[in-house]
Amino acid sequence: METAHFVIVGGGTAGWLTAFITQDSARRAGLDLKISVVESSKIPTVGVGEASTAALRVFFQYFGIDEFEFFRETGATFKLGIRHHNWRRKGYTYYGPIDDPHQVVAPPPGASSDYLNIYCVAAGRKVQDMHLFGPLLERRKAPYARKADGSLIPLGPFHHAFHFDQALLGQFLKRKAKGVEIVDAVVAGVERDPESGDIAALVTDDGARLAADFFIDATGFRKRIIVQELNAPWVSYQKELPVNRALPFWLDIADGEEINNYTHAWAQEAGWIWQIPTQTRYGCGYVYSDEFRTPDEAKREVEQLLGREIEVRSDIRFQIGRLETPWMHNCLAVGLSSSFLEPLESTSIHGTIVQMMLFGARFLKHPARMTAADRADYNARVGRQVDDFRTFVNMHYMTERDDTPFWREVKAHRLHPETKERLAFWRREMPKREHFVDFLDGLPHIETQLYYPVLDGLGILDPAVAKAEMARAPSVRAFARKTVDSLVREYRQAATRAMGHAEFLAYVRDNR
């Protein structure tokens, strides 16, 4: 069997996730594959607080990675959802829990895919309240309880997500990887086949040549191969996603202080602040539009809000959007090399995992047999995935706020036509899972389980439409009412048994 050599340029989270998934996909496909990861000890890794979706936990379970070890080694905490504050209007808070109660209740005959959500809207009840993670979020609890013998028991079957130090996650995955060659070097250039345009080899800063059959660009914002060498075109989302700059800073967590189990998205005068907890500090940042704030003004706004001075760690300018062709020739871009959206819904790591699982299951073969049709198909699917991320994030800006020039500009000019189209449709018919086309072979994507808490929290959905849909099936409505009542009672009671978040993290650290 002919061996194929894949080179991943850039380690970090995206690079090492890619190494794991590609190696496993090759094994399942019977492809003899050698994988090399090129990462330089000369390029410093900056640790920042980052959040995932539940896809990362599924990844850990599939590869047999000890979740508690991950907590210990990366400073990780739970992410059970997002706390949205001041988005709908100033002073208003709603939560976006990431569990889905529909998974644990078999629907009655004739029920739509989202009948519990539809019932809640019709009855004027908060969608978040029937989620297990709803009361856990409000009380900052872990999704575990202690048994009489002191051991832990999960409170439900739902997958949670994580917060962590991004640099530590990359190092953790690197230590867990097996059978991967590591090349400590900086890429200085590439050699390309003059006829096909394919990359033949990388040239490193010490003059060495690294030949391979396929190359994966995981170099982050630098886009070292896919853009600097192959000039891949860019699709900008700058018009629809109005923030373009970030002012990052840290806030320490005091001893004995309870730790948030959510990403805090706190809307401000010209954007929003993220707060992502690790075990010792909150990684924070004001994501804002520099059309309405200078960096100095942004810093003053944060300090006035917090009542204290902050130490700004850097000044980050965003290029928001995606590559039009993340797969060009024999090079595939992943992670931040492929796309970037403001970090409102933790789409980056999720996107990398799903994209590489899609690539591994549908397209992975010896590069000599990969075709232009394969590339076009992959690029269309991934482009649609990221466009869906854009529309979901853009939906968060459909708010009642008009109290600052930024929010008035957003409402008047920054909603994407697809966002408006979906909203118009969902004012006539309640959102349902079947409104989303499956183009990712059943892999997890942003659908109603994430849309409903946001649409409900922003007050966008029309209770009259929900009531009319429920009225067509009285037996379904009665079942939904009984089920929601039962879930709310059960989950509120479970939250009283749950461990505190900080208590859980201390338990994990002390029980190796």
Image (cartoon, rainbow, N blue to C red):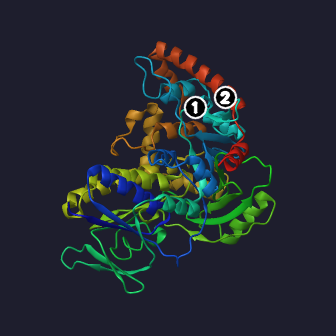
What percent of the width, then of the height, locates residue 79? 60, 46
Name the amino acid type tagged 2.
Answer: Ala
Query: What percent of the width, then of the height, locates residue 374?
Result: 24, 56
Question: Mark 1 highlights which residue?
Answer: 156
Residue 481 in sight in this render: yes
- Front residue of 5 and 350: 5
Image-based side of 197 in relation to 161, left or right: left
Give the class, few, some or many, for how many residues have Cα within 10 Å of label 1's Cα (few <14, many ≥20).
some
Tell me which amino acid carries mark 1: Gly
Q: Is residue 4 above or below residue 356?
A: below
Residue at x 50% of width, y 23% of height: 105
| Disc 2, SS | helix
Q: Which mark is residue 386?
A: none
Name the outermost residue toward the top.
475
Whether residue 237 can be seen here:
no
Tag 2 residue? 494
Q: Is residue 236 left or right of residue 196?
A: right
Q: Is residue 80 above or below residue 172?
A: above
Residue 400 in the image: x percent, y percent? 62, 44
Asked if disc 2 and disc 1 are in contact, CB closer than 8 Å, the reply is: yes
